[in-house]
Every structure is written in structure tokens, then in C-alpha cells.
Amino acid sequence: MIKKSIPLVCLCLLLCFHSQAQTVEDIFKNYDMRVTWFGIDYSQCKIIGSIGSFGGKSPTSPQELRDSYYPAWNQLILSEPEKYNIQSMIHRGSVAKDVSMVKKLNASVSLDSMEAITTPNYTTTEIQQFISNYPIDGKTGIGLVFIAESMDKATDEAYYHVVFFNIETKTVLLQERLKGAAGGFGLRNYWATSISKVMDYIREDGYYKWQKKYNGKVNNTKSKTAPTW
């Protein structure tokens, strides 16, 4: 009985170690570790000012914003991968995508809590709490999500928290608050521009700054071979 139990104990220890193993350095150097894009989480997003005037010449409602535009912005990234290229943004050969969780979270937003006077400026503790409450099961590796903080029509700006986290432990590995300028015709495209601006910054500048900050060195060559997962 003792001999048979030893391999089982070793396996449990190995699995526990694996679930804790993801570190911020893995984002920049471990190209074999799965990264999953979970989408844009609007469940904590605040519209600064009146939602009625949020759409400019085309007034919108809280329900339309939640039920139509939140799904549309997430779908846009999946439908136009050349423009909204997640792999290129974080310099990886491949990224898994699963936005089903954020779709459910976004769909459950209270219509009475979407407006605010000022942006909430979420703290690292609050962001960790949001991630800790994510209903994720059966996935491993590193998760990537944009947590939308606010959209302000008066300033034509949106704030997003770019968050990498250990999927199994739901521990935040890297969090950066970024601002994206809005622009373009139509409500969907207008705020989609703020997303693309943030993604462009990460791809061209932010990624390398974070790599130097968290990994101590910069590797200007992204993975040339997609992982086998």
C-alpha cells in the first residue's frame, strides 16, 4: 500500500506545483504555455455622464448598450483578427480564445448601475477581486482579459485594465491601466477605436516596457513557432 501510494503523492505534488507555476516571466519567455484570451469584461464598466447622450447624435439606452454593443465589441475582435490581432499584440505564435465567460458577465450587468460621474480608477486589490470571482473551470495556463473601467464621451476616452492571470489560481500576474482614444463613425466603431488604440500601444511599445520591467530584459523576436496545444 505504501509503495503504491508514493507515485500518487508525487503526482499530486506535481499537479499542485504546476497549478502554481505560472509567473509574470512566463508571459514573456515561456512560449509553450497556453495563453487564453477571455475578451473584454464590461461588467465593471462605468459610462461617465448620461448614457442617453453617450451615442452622440444617435441616443442609446442602457439595455441597448449592454445587450447589443457589449457583445458587438467582443465579437469584433473575433471577426476581424487582422485588425484586432491578439497574437501579434502579445508577440506569440498562437493564442486560444474563449469569450463565453465575459459574455455571461456582461449580460448580467445591472442597468441601474452603469452610469457614474467620474471614472472609478480601480485599484489592484479590486482588479484581483474581479478576477478571483471569474467562473472559470477546466482551463490551465495564463488568462488575458481587458477589464473595461470607463467610457467618457466628454473626453472621447476609455480606460481598460490589461490583465494577465494564472487561470487555475486566478492570481493576477500583470496588470496595467491604459487609456484609449475613441474615434470614427457610429457608436460601435467609435468605441472600438479605443480598443484598437490600446492594442496598438501594447504591440508597439507597452509589451517591451513590461518585458523589461518584469523580465529584466527585452527580446525583440516573438515566437516563430506556434505552440502545439
Image: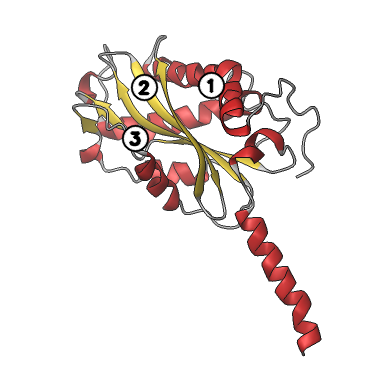
Could you classify mark 3 by the number of other residues whose Cα lies within 10 Å: few (under 14), some (14-19), or many (20 or more)?
many
Comes first in the chain, label 1 or label 3: 3
* Disc 1, SS: helix
Residue 40's x, y, as percent?
46, 34
From this viewpoint, which residue is outermost toward the front?
A: 216
Residue under numbered circle 3: 66
Comes first in the chain, label 2 or label 3: 3
Measure the alpha-carbon separation of dots 1 and 3. 22 Å
Residue 17's x, y, as percent?
66, 60
Residue 158, numbered circle: 2
> How many numbered marks are there?
3
Comes first in the chain, label 2 or label 1: 2
Q: Is residue 186 in view from this perspective?
A: yes
Residue under numbered circle 1: 199
Could you classify mark 1 by the number of other residues whose Cα lies within 10 Å: few (under 14), some (14-19), or many (20 or more)?
many
Could you classify mark 2 by the number of other residues whose Cα lies within 10 Å: few (under 14), some (14-19), or many (20 or more)?
many
- Residue type for callout 3: Arg
Give the residue at x 55% y 27%: 77
Residue 23's x, y, as percent?
61, 45
- Residue type for callout 1: Met
